[in-house]
Image: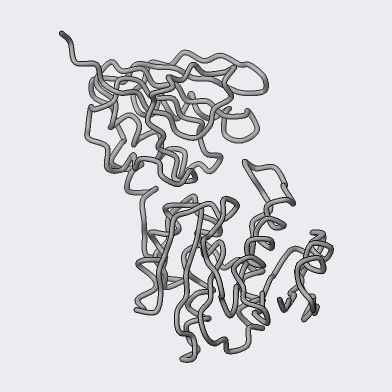
Amino acid sequence: MQDTKPNGVYGTPPAELADISAAAIQFSPLIPGSGQLEEQEVGSLGDMVVLAPPGTVERRYTIALALRALAPGGSLTVLAPKDKGGSRIAKELKGFSCDVSETSRRHHRICTCPRPPLPTGLDDALAEGGPRLDETLDLWTWPGVFSWNRLDPGSVLLEQNLPPLSGRGADFGCGIGILARAILASPKVEHLTLIDIDRRAAAMAERNIDDPRTSIRWADIRNGTNLKGLDFVVMNPPFHDGGAEDQSLGQAFIRRAAEALRPGGVLWLVANRHLPYEAVLKTLFKRVTPKIEANGYKIYEAQK
């Protein structure tokens, strides 16, 4: 009997646009618990469906990983909204020597092709899109993670205004560890839990933070943290999900922070000025103090 290879999926393509087996292995770095496409054996997958990332470097890297993991002749489907990289997919696949069929539905471009016997350009795309030491940041980073090639101005503002913290705390949405390094500069910090929904960010934070006082988790904070009795939480919460603004993300982060803090514990939060977090802060914290507003951002200190 012929050995049937498993199928894979990257991200959450709309069900009406791609036929995905319920048994397909999920490989998105943004879905905690997923497999790692980087570690998938060459030629080990039968078919693969990829909801392509919008960034060019990240998208080409992901497609190259998928082609490497597919068995020769295995089917690859890559789709994305037209205005978020979809219009470029066919050309990029042809650059890997793929014979592409392209269709358009529901504002998406959908490209399908068999895996060519000898794809070209995989090594260059994998090298360009993999982890790298950014000499300007002096940090390990990875294309596709939040603010991967620049300092986020909100995080910089929070870093500049954080007081020396003490006790046990957490960095919600830690990214590659920029805020964590500032927090850990205080010798009074006993332990810091770093949490991020992006596996790549958590992996880079592991490289960037060499401190025995830390633990790093790949997890979705919205699903709970199991942290209790913390002295402080620091966060620059996300407010986009799948490219669309979602103010409920930051509100969920604030609720999880309130659950994790002890009475008297403090939350330090930076947010874009237009985001309406005051109401949820005042509901969950006994004292909410606006600390600074600058460059389109605002910082709050909130005491449980």
Position of the N terminus by quadrant: top left
Q: Position of residue 110 (x, y in %)?
A: 53, 20
Horizontal arrangement in the rendering, residue 233 relative to residue 24 (left or right): right
Can you give x and y, in whole percent of width and height, for residue 295 in the image?
A: 76, 71
Rendering colour mode:
one colour
Quarter location, residue 274: bottom right
Q: Is residue 17 above or below residue 133?
A: above
Point 53% across, 71% down: residue: 170
Closer to the camera in the image, 60 or 233: 233
- What residue is rendered at 65% in x and 59% in y? 253
The x and y percentages for residue 2 are 17, 10
Quarter that holds the C terminus:
bottom right
Quarter holding residue 236:
bottom right
Q: Residue furthest top?
A: 1
Q: Left of 269 or right of it: where is 133?
A: left
Q: Quadrant of residue 159?
A: bottom right
Image coords of residue 124 (percent x, y): 32, 43
